Image (tube, rainbow, N blue to C red):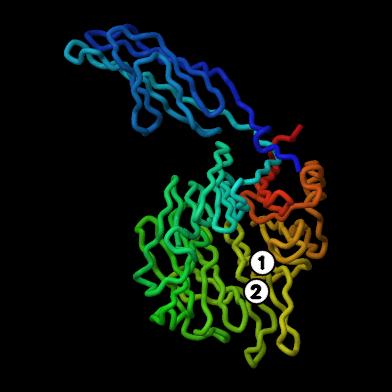
Amino acid sequence: MKNIFKTMLCAIIALAAISCVKSGPEKGNRLATPDVGCLINGTSVILSWEPVEYAALYEVSVDDAEAARTDECTYVVTDLLYSHEYTITVTAIAANQQTHSNSRPCVIDVEMPARDIPQYREWYPTNGAAGTAISNNGRYVVGTFDHQAFILDLNSDELTELSDIELNDVADNGIAVGSSLSTNINGVPAIYDNGKVIELDVSGLAENLTMGALTSITPDGKYAVGWIWDGAETYYTTQYGEYFPICYDLTSQSISVPAIPATLPYYSKLAGIAAKAVAPDRSILGYEASLDMFSIIWTNEATPFDYVYFDYDDQYNPVECLGDSNNLFSAKGRYVYGKGKLYDDNGYPTEYPAAYDRETGEMMWFSGGSVTAMTDDGIVFINDAPYYIGTTSYIVDLNTGDLSTQTPIADWLALEHGMSLGSYIPDGIIIIGTSEDGKTILGITNTMEGWLTCVIKLDGVAME
């Protein structure tokens, strides 16, 4: 499979007709304001100006960032964002502060150009990690496999590979959550923020931490959920089971355990309960491991959980339910998707791909392996086999009212979006996540070279 991750990157060079507006020569001993011009090159801005008499240095600042100083008459501002506006100021600093005062700043408003984003990008991290999640804004991708991880900024194409950590989700600001394995080989709930791994101190909840992880974070990067496994018999393990859910408020740096109901038909203290995903409104999705894996939901951490969808007879025997340890929210939280179970007369379940609409209360059943991704506007991605075992995704569009017609991913891209990606995904890909607007989708596939992670931009630029 052709790797075009690097070959599709192109520099955008544009001349910005921007300069300082001055009211004439300065009076008194104030230095003249630098007359600055700039050139935009990709994500950099090249500034240049004529020397200012009696100036020793020049101060350059970008928005509210700390100012940089240079004794040259050129300066390059790097690592800016496409489609973003910046205010840059350049000030001449007097050599002798007793005889001259610094100039007034030259203020430059710069609007960075939009980036031509290719429709398809793929990459093989050298550490073998595979994609696990994409941020709601479609900017960041995280991946993990066998104690290895990566985080990719799709704006700057900066790929960071990590060891002794696994990453499960990422916020719109690039804060990722997962499990650190540096101090505990089985994992400690952790956050990855700006190059730093921060392990959560859960000693106040677990007397004998066996393992744990943060599994999901809100798009604003302020609230995360996960679970911990305690090897000791404590208040929480007697209430929830050997493993129990946790919530972490990144603003207050506080850890809490969400509320538990007094009774439920199949709640068991002998198993465990875990938090799996969190929606933007901080409702929490998890699963209860008792008779079976039943999907549960907290409207907030202070309100006891209930089943997402659980139908049972008058003897409390299950008839059908939504339940699996990999079930997730759609980006805005409208749908819960993954797997459900239909039970026969003897109480034996058969698993099917399923999704639940929280707005309408409708439960939807499909054929195949599992629903591995879903947009809030009703596009369903169904793996042809159980998660990570299948080879490609099939698409069901709920807007048509037809739940039985499944279109292979390559055909759907061609028919609905005019994209000819057959040569890049001849064997298909498994779609495992989408951005909030549904225009950026994340896929993986297992190849002879290892796990291939790819991103498809539905409104991107056609490839050559």
Of the pair 25 and 455, the residue shown nearer to us: 455
- Real-space Cα separation, disc 1 to disc 2, in angstroms: 8 Å
Left or right of 75? Residue 337 is: right
Report the residue at 61% width, 59% height from top. Answer: 330
> x%, y% of residue 235?
39, 81
Q: Secondary structure at mark 2?
A: strand
Q: Say above or below: 152 vs 35.
A: below
Instruction: Check contact, mark 1 vs mark 2: CB within 8 A.
Output: yes
Q: Residue furthest bottom?
A: 315
Q: Which residue is tagged 1?
A: 338
Where residue 309 appears, as percent x and y from the top left, is 63, 75
Left or right relative to 406: residue 126: left
Tell me which amino acid carries mark 2: Leu
Q: Which residue is mark 2?
A: 322
Badge 1: few (under 14), some or many (20 or more) residues near its Cα, within 10 Å? many
The residue positioned 49% from the left and 32% from the top of the image is 79
In the picture, which quadrant includes the C terminus? top right
Q: The N terminus appears in which quarter of the rendering? A: top right
Q: Secondary structure at mark 1?
A: strand
Q: Position of residue 172 (x, y in %)?
A: 51, 48
Q: Earlier in the sequence, mark 1 or mark 2?
A: 2
- Residue positioned 47% across, 79% down in the render: 240
Taking depth in this image into account, of 447 and 195 the one nearest to the observer is: 447
Percent position of residue 303, x then y: 45, 73
Amino acid of disc 1:
Gly
Q: Residue at x 78, y 64 (%)?
A: 403
Q: Identify whether 73 is placed above or below 220.
A: above
How many other residues sit within 10 Å of disc 2, few (<14), some (14-19) or many (≥20)?
many
Residue 276 seen in the current view = yes
In the rendered view, tell whether residue 285 sits above or below residue 241: above
Figure quadrant of residue 148 = bottom right
In the image as oriented, which residue stretches furthest toward the left?
A: 98
